[in-house]
Image (cartoon, helix red, strand yellow):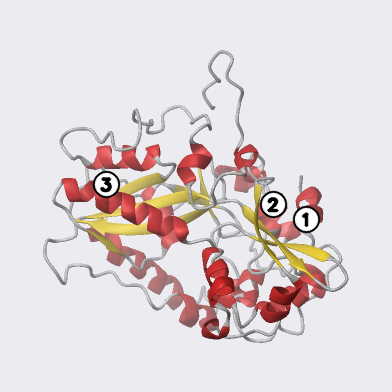
Amino acid sequence: MPDPPAAGEPQTTLWELAGHELNDPGAVLARVRRPAGEIGFPAGPGKWPEGNSMNGLLEELACHGFRARTVSADHAPELVDEIEERHRRGEFAEEFYRERLLDFRTSFNDAAPEIRTLIVVAAPQPIIRLIFHLPVKPVTLVVPPTYQYGVNEKAERLLKKCLKRAGCRLIRTSLPLKLLAARSGLGVYGRNNVCYVKGLGSFHRLMAFGTDLPWEEDSWGPARLMDTCSRCRACRRLCPTGAIQEEDFLLRAHRCLTFLNERSDPFPQWTDSSWHHAVVGCLHCQLVCPENKTVRNWSQAGDKFSEEETRLLLEGRRPEKIPADLRGRLERLGLLEYSEILPRNIQAALANSASSADFLLEEYA
């Protein structure tokens, strides 16, 4: 249970902080009461305890609003081994496996000193509301959590600054992040194959780094399904494509709306226009999930696109053909890589009479 607020201190919820900077998780969480037993905040940023310990580094991350766990880097091959074993058992559609699960890298030690620890990090992230000005009227569409990658750079800068004091290095990694978060104990799987982090639900972005600073706790363990999923079928009932399975937390990913609208291929004929509601990704299973009840109304204004800018976006230009200012704004929103499929996705969402952010959020409130 959350700690009670101090005398005279109001209880603060995540969505009440939606006005904070998009890529500043510290600002978002600074006033949120932490669950008992979690790593506490130091006196302030930069108060890393003496000894340059890994636990001190985790406290520094917590001070800036991140949640993190550590595991031995020796476990990295086990992540890919698990994926390969599931592939051999036929649990992944081949097109999904080839597009999403073949590019991981588990060998880090091509340069000294040896990478000894993996740090898996979750940054809180809201739903982003975007306004597109059309000739008839402005329309609001949404982008789910996880797409804004500016927090990765913030976490990387913070970790490099701290590790430099200890004479240690930091590297980026390419690993299956949901599986790593689940095996580290940072998160658990939902029946919808989404990763849930305590206090954040699924409203977060995951990232992972490697360092030669020794781990103090190898929190490696089995991935598990949330306890509440054993008695809840809400996401399975509400998933319009039938991607969520009864018996496992693995999706029929080739049917997942997120998988379909992140690709450049035309939508399959079996999809229904009423299912589309986001610029990219999907929120149906997340908004109906009881584990998100304290965060699912957390949305934030992202950007407004003029009628001329909307017209340019609906042309589906390649990134390098988009004017510099507009290109930078799309990049900050995590949408630049989708610029060529934005026309299809935006038009699909606009065709759905229930596509506005207000209607979507109210529907699951």
Q: Nearer the viewer, mark 2 or mark 3?
A: 2
Q: Residues within 10 Å of mark 2 (few under 14, many from 20)?
A: many
Residue 360, numbered label: 1
Per the image, label 1 sits on a secondary structure element best described as helix
Q: Position of residue 39 (x, y in %)?
A: 37, 33
Q: Position of residue 62 (x, y in %)?
A: 39, 39
The answer to whether residue 178 of the structure is visible from this angle is no
Of the residues under marks 1 and 2, which one precedes in the sequence?
A: 2
x 64%, y 39%: residue? 294
Q: Quadrant of the C terminus?
A: top right
Is residue 289 positioned above or below 16 on the image?
below
Q: Nearer the viewer, mark 1 or mark 3?
A: 1
Quadrant in the picture for residue 359: bottom right
Q: Position of residue 357 (x, y in %)?
A: 76, 57
Of the residues under marks 2 and 3, which one precedes in the sequence?
A: 3
Residue 218, numbered label: 3
x 59%, y 72%: residue? 326
Is residue 152 positioned above or below 66 on the image?
below
CA distance separating discs 2 and 3:
33 Å
Q: Residues within 10 Å of mark 3 (few under 14, many from 20)?
A: some
**Is disc 1 in contact with disc 2, using a CB cutoff of under 8 Å?**
yes
Residue type at the position of mark 3: Asp
Which residue in the structure is indicated by mark 2?
287
Q: Position of residue 28 (x, y in %)?
A: 53, 41
Of the residues under marks 1 and 3, which one precedes in the sequence?
A: 3
